[in-house]
Image (cartoon, grey):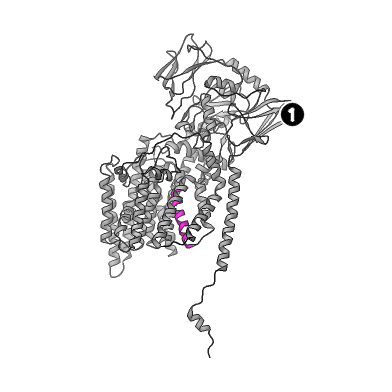
């Protein structure tokens, strides 16, 4: 039995990987064909973050676990690590070559789905014994649910929640039985550290499953909920060193665009239970038709106790309805409607349906009446989806084939059981048929979705030779920390510095600091994703202020001219406050006037002409024959960056704008004044600067007075000389009075110490908990020996 129990998770994992790869191969999607796989956040966040992790593991990155010097002119990395790279599977990227980072992320994605399937099998067999091969197929159907193959496949961090749900249900079983008091909190900690967002949903779902299990078994001992609360609390506490910085990173982040929850139509909800459907705003609850059939058969399965049937049926319906009611919708999503997919908890419903299907099957193969009931449920779902626009030409044929195959497999099993001599060959054929139907439906859904994504979402080229050429050129020009090298305004992804190298302004994260977004916007920077996807700002003044000495432009690396060092000294006086004008804000940080702002929009000959129009969407050029620049403002989701229109060559030439004409302002840059201002700052700069993965140290010139400014955003966590850093127009700063020979600034992500303290407290609490449980066992009276044994030991007369 143990051998077979080990076979079941392996078979589930194999079926899952086979279906996913087969579907991608049919669609000819990377890595099996020319079609792009990198869409939206997969290309903009997950591939670059895994690339940075690769660099970090190989000691080739600027910064460390605490501070990321590459992105956003210097940002915290620990919150991003906990959000995007907390899964143990992420470490596997170290085994690949750097240029194969896309293959590494694909491998991690498939392995996560396979691991989720295997975890579900282990949990099912722990809940109740049953046919191991059937558990394998049901586990695979969970790993291949629509939510996984349609949505989470390009948000790989969500797949950690797919793994967490069955694991936390397994912890619930240990809690019921009073077993594994050490392993339970450790599993909870791993799940929450991997991805707290989906782990929260998985924990909520697993808690509800535990309650149903207790109610079905009439187990209402107060010890069980106490053990459950202690186990989860200790587990979350153990994960505190990651969770607290992540939580505080979210608090300091630029706020996401508000979104109102709109429940999906029930016809569309029904359609998403069927194969080959796609939508971004409905719950992708597809499971193999066999699983749906077995789940639907439970209510009429006479061998299952009536109480248990009613509890599971009611619970499943309640979970489905909770997705459509705003108060419970908010509860599932940590009390905030997410941007993007609004049904991120759908994997819990898929897991519940799999548990329901297994519950019925574990009591015996469903009879004719139960199968008719299950087929009726499938038919009702199909009929309810008939009015949905999400149904495709492949949906009902795949459903019909799946239903016929599942019914045929179950008929074969029952025929084998009715034979005079049990015929294992019937079970073998049934297993192959049921598994084949699942793999076929899941592969078809994967292939259909691969093609649909390319038509509906932004897509990006896979990492290849062009990326490597650009990365090598940036590495050759790198001069950090003497100067920054920016990967360029012509971005391939939102996190290009992590993917290609350099130390630029571009940065995209759910933890993008509010101070970074507002500072960059005040200087004329652009963004997408409502202010969380910041773009590089190609501007001579900001390049000088932030020490960008080289940048990618026009398909090559160019030198930008003299720049202010990473650490500079400003005269004594009040720190500047940024105002409305981006041109004046740049001058305030530079400390000199370098722009003319003509009221008629005409610059003097020889000046470089800049257009600042954050809300403008269209094209602009200088005069009739100037080079065309494209601006993509669409506030608040998109903000257009300040753009150069070239040098004024002809007197009287004006910028010509074509598009949605909104407010704009022209600035005329005098490069000679800029050079003079930079030279003055360089003359007063520290004699040397040493940069580490958690801060900087600058050696000052004798008698230096004024404000020492670090060209990095003053995000929460910076301290200088043992006290919170000051701000200089949004940058890190510290005042000096002439007595200091050096200045040291250190960065610690907010919540790091509190998290470490919480982890230690949780570890101590776990030790106490284990000691108490051990003492209880030692105090418990030994079980009495059997009566027969006592009689044997009684002396005779």
**Residue 41 in view:** yes
Residue 797, percent from left and from top? 53, 91
Q: Nearer the viewer, residue 441 or 637?
A: 637
Residue at the farthest top position: 651
When asked about the image quadrant of residue 296, the answer is bottom left
Left or right for 467, reference 64: left
**Residue 121 in view:** no
Q: Nearer the viewer, residue 125 or 440?
A: 125
Residue 83, percent from left and from top? 50, 42
- Residue pictured at 43% horizontal, 39% vertical: 338
Residue 263, percent from left and from top? 35, 41
Left or right for 48, reference 281: right
Please identify the dominant SS of the magenta region: helix
333 vs 571: above or below: below
> Which contiguous range is marked in magenta?
160-177
Left or right for 676, reference 53: right
Disc 1 target residue: 739
Q: How many marks?
A: 1
């Amino acid at each position: 039995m143990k051998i077979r129990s080990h076979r079941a998770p392996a078979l589930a994992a194999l079926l899952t990987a086979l279906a996913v790869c087969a579907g991608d191969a049919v669609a000819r999607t990377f890595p099996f064909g020319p079609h792009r796989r990198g869409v939206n956040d997969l290309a903009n966040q997950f591939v670059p973050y895994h690339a940075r992790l690769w660099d970090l593991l190989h000691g080739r990155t600027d910064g460390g676990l605490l501070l990321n010097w590459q992105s956003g002119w210097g940002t915290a990395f620990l919150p991003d690590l906990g959000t995007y790279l907390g899964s143990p599977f992420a470490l596997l990227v170290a085994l690949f070559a750097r240029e194969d980072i896309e293959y590494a992320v694909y491998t991690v994605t498939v392995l996560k789905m396979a691991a989720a399937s295997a975890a579900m099998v282990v949990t099912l067999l722990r809940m109740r014994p049953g046919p191991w091969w059937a558990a394998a197929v049901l586990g695979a159907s969970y790993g291949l649910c629509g939510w996984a193959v349609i949505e989470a496949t390009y948000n790989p961090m969500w797949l950690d929640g797919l793994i967490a749900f069955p694991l936390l249900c397994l912890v619930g079983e240990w809690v019921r039985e009073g077993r594994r008091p050490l392993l339970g909190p450790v599993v909870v900690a791993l799940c929450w550290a991997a991805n707290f967002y989906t782990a929260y949903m998985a924990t909520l779902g697993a808690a509800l499953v535990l309650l149903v299990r207790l109610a079905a078994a009439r187990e209402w001992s107060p010890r069980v909920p106490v053990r459950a609360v202690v186990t989860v609390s200790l587990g979350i506490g153990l994960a505190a060193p990651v969770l607290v910085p992540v939580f505080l990173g979210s608090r300091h982040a630029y706020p996401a665009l508000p979104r109102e929850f709109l429940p999906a139509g029930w016809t569309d909800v029904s359609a998403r239970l069927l194969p080959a459907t796609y939508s971004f705003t409905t719950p992708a609850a597809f499971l193999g038709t066999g699983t749906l059939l077995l789940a639907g058969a439970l209510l009429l399965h006479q061998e299952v106790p009536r109480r248990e049937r009613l509890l599971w049926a009611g619970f499943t319906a309640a979970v489905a309805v909770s997705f459509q009611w705003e108060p419970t919708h908010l509860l599932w999503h940590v009390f905030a409607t997410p941007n993007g997919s609004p049904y991120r908890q759908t994997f819990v419903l898929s897991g519940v349906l799999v548990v329901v299907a297994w519950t019925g099957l574990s009591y015996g193969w469903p009879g004719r009446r139960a199968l008719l009931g299950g087929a009726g449920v499938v038919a009702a779902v199909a009929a309810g989806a008939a009015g949905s626009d999400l149904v495709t030409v492949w949906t009902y044929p795949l459903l019909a084939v799946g239903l016929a195959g599942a019914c045929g497999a179950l008929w074969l099993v029952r025929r084998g059981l009715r034979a005079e001599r049990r015929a294992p060959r019937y079970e073998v054929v049934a297993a192959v048929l049921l598994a084949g139907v699942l793999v076929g439906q899941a592969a078809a859904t994967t292939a259909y979705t691969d093609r649909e994504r390319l038509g509906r979402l932004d897509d990006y080229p896979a990492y290849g030779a062009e990326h490597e050429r650009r990365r090598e050129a940036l590495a050759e020009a790198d001069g950090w920390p003497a100067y920054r090298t920016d990967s360029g305004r012509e971005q391939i992804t939102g996190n290009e510095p992590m993917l290609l190298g350099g130390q630029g302004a571009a940065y995209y994260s759910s933890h993008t600091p509010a101070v970074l977004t507002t500072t960059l916007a005040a200087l004329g920077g652009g963004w997408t994703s409502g202010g969380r996807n910041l773009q590089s700002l190609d501007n001579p003044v900001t390049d000088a202020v932030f020490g960008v000495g080289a940048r990618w432009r026009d398909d090559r690396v160019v030198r930008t001219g003299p720049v202010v060092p990473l650490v500079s000294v400003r005269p004594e006086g009040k720190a500047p406050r940024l105002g409305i004008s981006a041109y004046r804000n740049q001058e305030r940080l530079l400390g000199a006037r370098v722009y003319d702002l003509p009221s008629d929009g005409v610059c003097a000959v020889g000046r470089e002409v800049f257009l600042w129009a954050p809300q403008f969407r269209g094209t602009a050029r200088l005069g009739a024959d100037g080079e065309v620049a494209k601006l993509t403002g669409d506030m608040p989701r998109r903000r257009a960056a300040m753009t150069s229109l070239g040098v004024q060559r002809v007197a009287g030439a004006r910028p010509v704008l074509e598009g949605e004409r909104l407010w704009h302002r022209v600035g005329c840059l005098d490069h000679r004044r800029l050079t003079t201002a930079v030279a003055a700052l360089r003359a007063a700069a520290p004699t040397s600067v040493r940069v580490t993965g958690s801060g900087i140290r600058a050696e000052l010139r004798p008698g230096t007075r004024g404000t020492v400014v670090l060209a990095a955003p003053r995000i929460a966590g910076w301290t200088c000389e043992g006290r919170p850093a000051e701000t200089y127009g949004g940058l890190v700063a510290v005042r000096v009075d002439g007595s200091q020979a050096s200045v040291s600034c250190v960065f610690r992500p907010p919540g790091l110490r509190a998290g470490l303290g919480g982890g230690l407290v949780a570890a101590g609490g776990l030790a106490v908990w284990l000691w108490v449980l051990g003492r209880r066992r030692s105090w418990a009276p030994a079980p009495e020996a059997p009566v027969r044994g006592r009689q044997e030991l009684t002396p005779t007369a």
